[in-house]
Amino acid sequence: MIPNEEITCTAYLRYLLAHPRFREKLTKQATGTSGSMLNISQAKVRGIEMPVPPIKLQKQFADFVWRNYDIRNKLEVASQSSNTLFDSLLYRAFKGDL
């Protein structure tokens, strides 16, 4: 899919396509016998109603989402680092090095 950048931004469209409710709509329109190999035609995708706010709001939304992902990634790294340091401290404490 290549979005018309005057109508929708790629980040917004990507988020929308990954959203569980929208994916449910896609799945209902898809054909195929295997859940992992469902197919959907371009015509069916185009026929599905989707919320398309003004491009300015889409870009604000995308910026918000990417900042949120960035913060979550930094928190995950900090958590892993904290756990590693805590495990090291426990090891040293039980070993009698403290």
Image (tube, grey):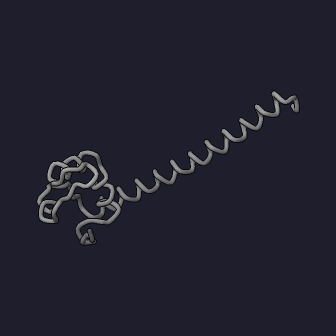
Where on the picture, by quarter, is residue 84? top right
Q: Residue at x 25, y 48 (%)?
A: 35
Q: Provide residue 32's location: percent of width, then percent of height.
A: 18, 54
Q: How many badges with numbers are in the image?
A: 0
For the N terminus, the image quarter is: bottom left
Up the image or down, 38 lies above or below 1; here it is above
Residue at 41 percent of width and 59 percent of height: 63
In the image, taking residue 10 as reference, residue 43 lies left or right, namely left
- Residue 39 is situated, as x and y percent measured from the top left of the image, at 20, 58
Percent position of residue 85, x then y: 72, 40
69 on left or right of 5: right
Quadrant that contains the C terminus: top right
Q: Nearer the viewer, residue 88 or 35?
A: 35
Q: Quadrant of residue 11?
A: bottom left
Residue occupying image coordinates x 46% and y 52%:
69
Q: Position of residue 59 (x, y in %)?
A: 34, 62
Q: Is residue 55 found left or right of 86 in the rendered image? A: left
Is 1 situated left or right of 89 in this image?
Answer: left
Camera-side residue: 13 or 57? 13
Residue lying farthest front? 33
Q: Residue at x 62, y 43 (%)?
A: 80
